[in-house]
Image: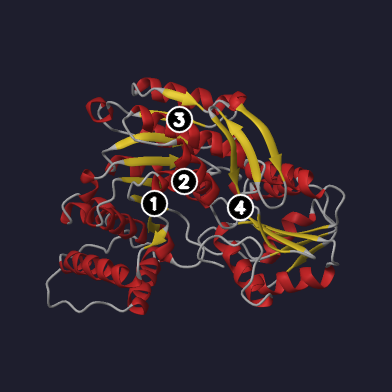
Amino acid sequence: MQQTDKLMTFQEAVAYLEELKAKERNKERGVGADFLCEKSGYPQKELSFIQITGSNGKSSVLAFLSGVLKACGYRTGSYISPALFEQREKIQINGRPISKKEYCRQITRLREMCRDLEREGKSAPTVYALERAMAFQYFKEQGCQIVVWETSLNEWAEDDKRIPNVLVYVFTCTGLEHKGILEKGLRKEGKDKEDIQDRIAVAAKSRPEVMELLQKRMEDLNIPLFAADLSKVSGIRRNLKRQIFSCQEYENLTTSLLGTWQVENGALAIAALKQLKEKGFDIPEKAVYKGFAAAAVPCRFQILAKRPYFIVDGAKDGEGVEKLAETLRFYFTGRRLIYIIGMLRDIRREKEGEPDCAEENRPLAGSLLGACPPAEQVLTIPTKGEGGLSSYESACMVREYHDRVTAADSVEEAAELAYLLADRDTVIVAFGCLCDMGDFIRYVEKKNGNNIVNAPAGRK
């Protein structure tokens, strides 16, 4: 970027990303992140990474790991997806999102590269590509000593090809419905064996079919795979403020993440930290306790209000909803429940032309409601994005499994209806597409005067 280039305002930067998204919706396929990384001098080559993927639990494991590494004194970058409130949340250092000024500087720099592309008759890059190139450059400029990188199963293979220095792969719990995506991603993983020396993988306990697939591919790549040992977890105590548990040599770890599954995520983070210690990272015991206590992730069984309880959770698939159901039974057995559900269609399968893919959400609706304790009322909301469903479409699917279903036109309307139907002892649970869960936080904050019960840092 030349010195004479005018720095974009934050509003202009956001508008530019929306412009790129519009081009994607119009099927204009842009160049990938590789082009932008090449133009930037491959900044990721000067960084070291922990790469996290899987169906569920990625952001929670990231929060544990980045919190501990920060407490150790390491300058720690984090790439988090999706964003709930604004795009800057995706790129953080030591828990602080990239500043608006720096965000604008990076977008301005990359926009000039994109304009050069368009002058050559090529399409502009995708938002996916631009954000990753921006994160790499920012983490390099800010001198990050390690980066904890979260990526979806759909994007893992592409991300892995452009990240050369992965110290530890972390595979969170992966459901059977994502086995095909994982298998495809593992096949696409194309690093030469010389490029993957000294790498380690740790994995959460998943279904045997998934573990067998993962084990075989890691063996092919000569990457040792270690499973998080849940037999070393003990002394679990929990209430609606915190959980306490012991894992390996760490006794009475405390976290404010309330889902019963967070103990498994914590054990996985401990397994990854053990591998980092063996690679020479100085990780004092007190830093582990401090990092776990500081871990905060919005919309993971997050209590926004009491009397009635209003809870938001990002469970959107069978595996995630089973975990949510387990937590609801532990804390709220016998309580009156109202569910607000945001569902997505499986757009990936539609694109790949798989037969009967349009019907996949019907059994999904059944698994969502079948796993959870019975609700008195179900409300559906429209969901955002390419795989979004109207509230009416979702309601039609849910109605096959529940008699009392209402389609709401918006998050706000669904929340208002839920409050009207609830009494002080009711538990309202909004779950599904994470991109919509942030809107519930905004609504409850506004209703309660910007005061929510269990607010992550920066939202209090």
- In the shown orientation, is residue 327 left or right of residue 181? right
Q: Which numbered disc covers residue 78?
A: 1
Is mark 2 in CB contact (under 8 Å) with mark 1? Answer: yes
Label 3 vs 1, first from the N-terminus: 1
Which residue is rendered at x = 24% and y = 30% of the image?
195
Residue type at mark 4 is Arg
Question: Dot 2: what SS?
Answer: helix
Residue 362, position as x, y percentages in the image? 69, 49
**Residue beneath disc 3:** 202
Using the image as rendered, state which of residue 371 and residue 330 is in the foreground.
330
Q: Marks 3 and 2, how far apart in space?
A: 14 Å
Label 4 vs 2, first from the N-terminus: 2
Which residue is rendered at x = 65% and y = 53% of the image?
301
Q: Which numbered disc covers residue 62?
A: 2
Q: Which numbered disc covers residue 300?
A: 4
Q: Marks 3 and 1, how far apart in space?
A: 19 Å
Is mark 4 in CB contact (under 8 Å) with mark 2? Answer: no
Q: Which numbered disc covers residue 345?
A: none
Label 3 vs 2, first from the N-terminus: 2
Label 4 vs 3, first from the N-terminus: 3
